[in-house]
Image (cartoon, rainbow, N blue to C red):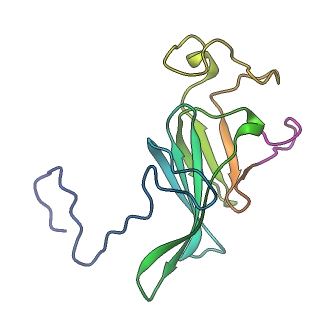
């Protein structure tokens, strides 16, 4: 695009094409719908491919969430296809809240970060987690963590040296 005055218009050059892959409230293939207030979105390639991978989408809300889509680029139609979509089950780590920032690791996992700590939420009536900092009684504050997710299995990773099972 040629430089020009800034506007609020979304301009796509004629050499490019826009495709909506998914939006809030769309059904996920494995049940449920894509949550609203989407934030960090990361692509994890399968075997270094730019045409086959996993798309991770954070939901910055309470409770929080992450959905992972298996996506493949069809070079004939020049469109992305979603072959599977699933919400991550965070019940093993109690829950998440306001999944905001994130990253794709060099070893091809997803890190999803909670925007608020348990101390931030403890006395805030706007959130459903008012009152306690450790709802699941594991000895740790429940919120304010970075959570590593395996996009292949769509599960929270059990960290070495952590609690037994998935960890924040």
Q: Is residue 130 above or below residue 152?
A: above
Determine the residue positioned at 70% across, 41% down.
Answer: 90
Residue 129 covered by magenta stretch: no
Q: Quadrant of residue 31?
A: bottom right
Q: Nearer the viewer, residue 10 or 48?
A: 10
Q: Is residue 38 above or below residue 45?
A: above
Q: Is residue 140 left or right of residue 59?
A: right
For the magenta stretch, what is the residue range? 157-168
Residue 165 covered by magenta stretch: yes
- Can you say which quadrant of the picture contains the N terminus? bottom left
Give the image location of residue 151, x and y in percent. Answer: 67, 59
Q: Is residue 103 left or right of residue 77?
A: right
Whether residue 51 appears in this view of the structure is yes
Determine the residue positioned at 62% across, 28% down.
Answer: 144
Q: Quadrant of residue 70?
A: bottom right
Name of the residue lying farthest toward the bottom: 76
Q: Is residue 69 left or right of residue 13?
A: right
Q: Nearer the viewer, residue 35 or 132?
A: 35
Give the image location of residue 109, x and y in percent. Answer: 67, 56
Determine the residue positioned at 82% across, 45% down.
Answer: 158
- Can you say which quadrant of the picture contains the C terminus? top right
Q: Is residue 2 above or below residue 62?
A: below
Magenta: main secondary structure equals: loop
Give the image location of residue 108, x and y in percent. Answer: 66, 61
């Amino acid at each position: 695009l040629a430089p020009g005055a800034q506007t609020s218009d979304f301009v796509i050059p004629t050499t490019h094409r826009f495709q909506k892959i998914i939006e809030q409230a769309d059904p996920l293939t494995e049940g449920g719908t894509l949550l609203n207030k989407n934030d960090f979105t990361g692509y994890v390639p399968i075997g270094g491919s730019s045409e086959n991978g996993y798309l991770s989408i954070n939901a910055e809300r309470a409770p929080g969430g992450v959905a992972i889509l298996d996506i493949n680029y069809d070079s004939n139609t020049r469109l992305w296809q979603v072959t599977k979509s699933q919400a991550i089950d965070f019940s093993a780590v109690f829950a998440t809240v306001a999944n905001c920032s994130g990253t794709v690791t060099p070893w091809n996992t997803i890190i999803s970060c909670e925007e608020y700590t348990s101390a931030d939420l403890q006395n805030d009536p706007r959130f459903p987690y008012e009152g306690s900092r450790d709802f699941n009684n594991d000895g740790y504050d429940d919120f304010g963590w970075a959570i590593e997710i395996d996009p292949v299995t769509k599960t929270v990773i059990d960290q070495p040296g952590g609690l037994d099972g998935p960890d924040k």
